[in-house]
Image (cartoon, rainbow, N blue to C red):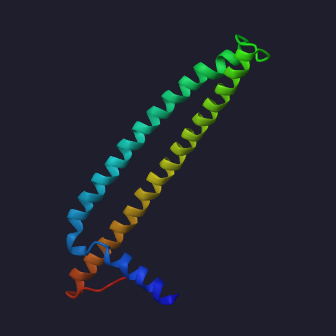
Amino acid sequence: MEQANSSVRDRLLSRLPQPENLPAYREEVSAALAKNEKTFRRQKWATGALWIYVIGFAVIPLTMGWLRLDTRNGATYGFVAFFMLLFGAVELLKLFINRNRVEILKELKQVQLQVLELQASLVKGTGAPQKIL
């Protein structure tokens, strides 16, 4: 079991960027974070539009008494409205999860860039590369 953990560790550490490639990696990270932010804003607008539609189509007719739930058509409409609200709630949950994912990714990349800057400063200070990890 220990060998499996060390091989996973070695594979993950081999994918880390080197301090020599810091400017290129910084550009790559900023481009990826900008893309994630743009995607998140698009999802935020889509979820907002979905919620406006759900409220307009499902909740308002039911609360205003425009449909009677004791009739067959009213019961069918209530059933559809329930699933629309459920679908809207799932989309809202996905939005919250994605927002937290983007925030954690930003923090993680910021820490990773700081570690790379420290490694680069160590390399410049001593002349020989040293590994922090």
Q: Give the camera-side residue of 73 and 121.
A: 73
Indicate whether 18 appears above or below 5.
above
Q: Give the camera-side residue of 119 and 48.
A: 48
Q: Quadrant of the C terminus?
A: bottom left
Say whether residue 71 is left or right of residue 2. Answer: right
Say if residue 63 shows up in the picture: no
Q: Give the camera-side residue of 30 and 56.
A: 56
Question: Residue drawn at (47%, 84%), measured in percent from left and top?
Answer: 4
Say if residue 41 shows up in the picture: yes
Residue 79 horizontal/vertical position (percent) = 69, 27
Residue 119 horizontal/vertical position (percent) = 30, 78
Question: Residue drawn at (77%, 14%), measured in percent from left and top?
Answer: 71
Residue 129 horizontal/vertical position (percent) = 24, 85
Residue 132 horizontal/vertical position (percent) = 36, 82
Q: Give the camera-side residue of 58 and 98.
A: 58
In the picture, residue 52 is in which quadrant? top right
